[in-house]
Amino acid sequence: MEYPCLFIMSICTLVHRYGLLLLKICKDLTENNTNSTPEKLTKILVDFNIIEKKIRLLTKTFSTPLLIILLIYFSKLFTTMSYCLRKELTPLLLFELCSNGSTSLLMMFFLTTCCSRIPDYMLRIKTKAKVLIDNQVLRGLEGSKNMYLLNRISKKDTIYLSAGGLLDFKKSFVFSTFGTVFAYGLLILNLSRIS
């Protein structure tokens, strides 16, 4: 149980560091909105491109391990629920089942919330760039180099960390996971009452 937890904490630490770098870019865009020079925007775009490449590498590197981690925790949850069908649960077994189930739910929650921050931060940067584009249009500077650079930033794709390419880590994944676990829990509870 401790190795997947350590792996998740390592992933969350890396994602948090990249998130801080993305927030710095968003802050730089915010500070430069009144008197942005093409040189400042070029530096911001170069930094954004470097971070984007590193995040894509992070996504490729962690895709399969994230899938394996999710499968481990889902199997732990469903094993816990299937043990609940037993007629006699000793206090020790009940404690073990509760600790495994709660740890699995917490780790999936932490993993999903950490991994969903990267797209959120990227969307903030794109939104800020679009606001700056609108400001440039209002000033009548549509053909400027600033407009070109801001358009490049706003047109970037949002990168989602994924588990084996099967699912993207979004905040909605937390709700669907808890809903699925709750529904299966109710089914198992009803099965144990019928038997």
Image: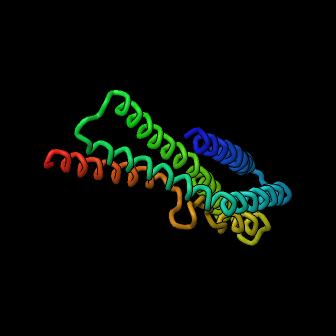
Question: From this viewpoint, is residue 139 visible?
Answer: no
**In terms of depth relative to the viewer, which is nearer, 25 or 171?**
171
Q: Quadrant of the N terminus?
A: top right
Q: Residue 26: image x %, image y %?
A: 68, 49
Give the residue displayed 35% in from the left and 50% down from the top. Answer: 181
Give the colour scheme shown: rainbow
Extreme top residue here? 91
Q: Is residue 5 left or right of residue 74?
A: right
| Quadrant position of residue 50 | bottom right
Q: Is residue 173 left or right of residue 53?
A: left
Give the residue displayed 61% in from the left and 63% down from the top. Answer: 158
Question: From this viewpoint, is residue 195 visible?
Answer: yes
Q: Is residue 81 left or right of residue 108?
A: left
Q: Residue 91: image x %, image y %?
A: 33, 27
Q: Residue 43: image x %, image y %?
A: 83, 56
How many numbered circles are shown? Answer: 0
Extreme right residue here? 39
Give the residue displayed 58% in from the left and 38% down from the top. Answer: 2
Q: Is residue 121 left or right of residue 34?
A: left
Give the residue displayed 34% in from the left and 32% down from the top. Answer: 94
In this picture, is 5 found above or below 92? below
| Quadrant position of residue 7 | top right
**In terms of depth relative to the viewer, which is nearer, 23 or 52?**
52
Q: Residue 191: image x %, image y %?
A: 19, 50
